[in-house]
Amino acid sequence: MLYNALPNRLFYWIVTRRESMIISRYLVREVLQTLLAVTFVLLLIFISQQLVHLLDYVASGKIGANAMLHVIATMIPHLLIILLPLSLFLAVLLTYGRMYSDNELWIIHGGGYSIWRLAKLTGILSAGVAVVVLILSLWINPYIEAERQQALASGSIDNMLDALMPGQFKDISNDGSNRVIYVEKISRDHHRARNIFLAEQKPPKADAPASWMVLAADSGYQQADPATGNTFVVAEHGYRYDGIPGKANYEIIQFGQYRVRVPDMPTSLLAHLTSAIPSRILLQHYHEAAQAAELQMRLSWPLITICLALFAVPLSWVRPRRSRYFMLLPGILVFVIYLNLLFLAQKMVQQQTVSIGIGLWWVHVLALLLPIGLIFWRMRQI
């Protein structure tokens, strides 16, 4: 009864507006469902791949088993920064491609819901995902990246026996000395080892060649000095041999207990990892090429999310009854080219062949103009 009292144009606008909202909610729901499914599958694939590498590191003694789960957990935010733009791109491509193939979107376009309105809806949806990517890229990932690198650097320090494989030699060289350790057996709790062998080549001096220290013990365990924080391997019931190979003047020392300091793993890598530097520090040093390139790359991931989602709108356009996967290969090719151009631009900024002002932004401008041009071209074809 109320609708009969309204002017025809207002009545038509209300009905059209209501139908448009219903269609928009339906499209957003379909895209989000596909986005969650694609993100979960891709995340599972990438984590499984990284797990293989980490198991190889554990087997070779590069990191301890206790650090592996922590490293995997800290990988997830970094992976999501890359996977969310790709997942949204594939979700839009697959969802709209299916709806075009099943004639759903053709009927929706025929009812007045244009490709341009579809692009606007996709842009709003991608902006919401881009906010999540921005938070991950600017604040969460740099902090977690520093934690991850610290875990990798210290994974074999917390308990060196975690990083040793029974029956295998392990190189623990550092600070100019060559050190090799070997244990025959390790207890289940990784607190004690049996039949320990340690060889250390000391740096040569001006008046003497390099000497060797060889230690053999029946058992041993790791111990941390509470005063200094240094880590020691405590060997029990064994012998220590000191001397120069080929010469008879060497020393033999029998001991009941002997402590050998475990060398600190190099942590200077963190100082050179720009991915672990907080964004506010990068902003303060924006005049430096390396810092500017890193900050622009962090800001690029949200832009990638929006540009790729808009690119998927014209790429998903297929004729009725044609395969929904028809444009999947060209879409992945677009993603690969886009990322490679960004990494190339980042390298050019780091090498100062391109000014910081131009930086990576020209890639995003190109990636934004191309889908807009394709959208207008598709509009003329309908």
Image: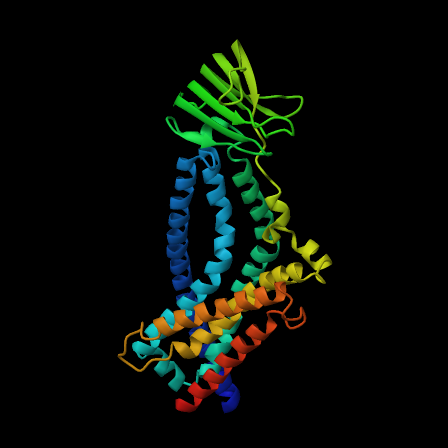
Q: Depth check: 17 or 288 in front? A: 288
- Residue reaching furthest left? 321
Q: How many marks?
A: 0
Whether residue 2 is visible here, answered yes or no, is: no
Identified at 49% across, 13% down, the residue is 239
Colour scheme? rainbow
- Residue 374's place in the image compared with 34, above or below, is below
Q: Depth check: 268 or 75 in front? A: 268
Where's residue 67, x and y in %? 49, 36
Q: Depth check: 308 or 245 in front? A: 245
Where's residue 276, x and y in %? 60, 50
- Residue 156's place in the image compared with 35, above or below, is above
The C terminus sits in image quarter: bottom left
Position of 287 with respect to 142 (left or right) is right
> Image quarter for residue 211?
top right
Where's residue 192, x and y in %? 45, 19
Where's residue 210, x and y in %? 56, 28
Q: Depth check: 211 or 134 in front? A: 211
Whether residue 30 is visible here, answered yes or no, is: yes
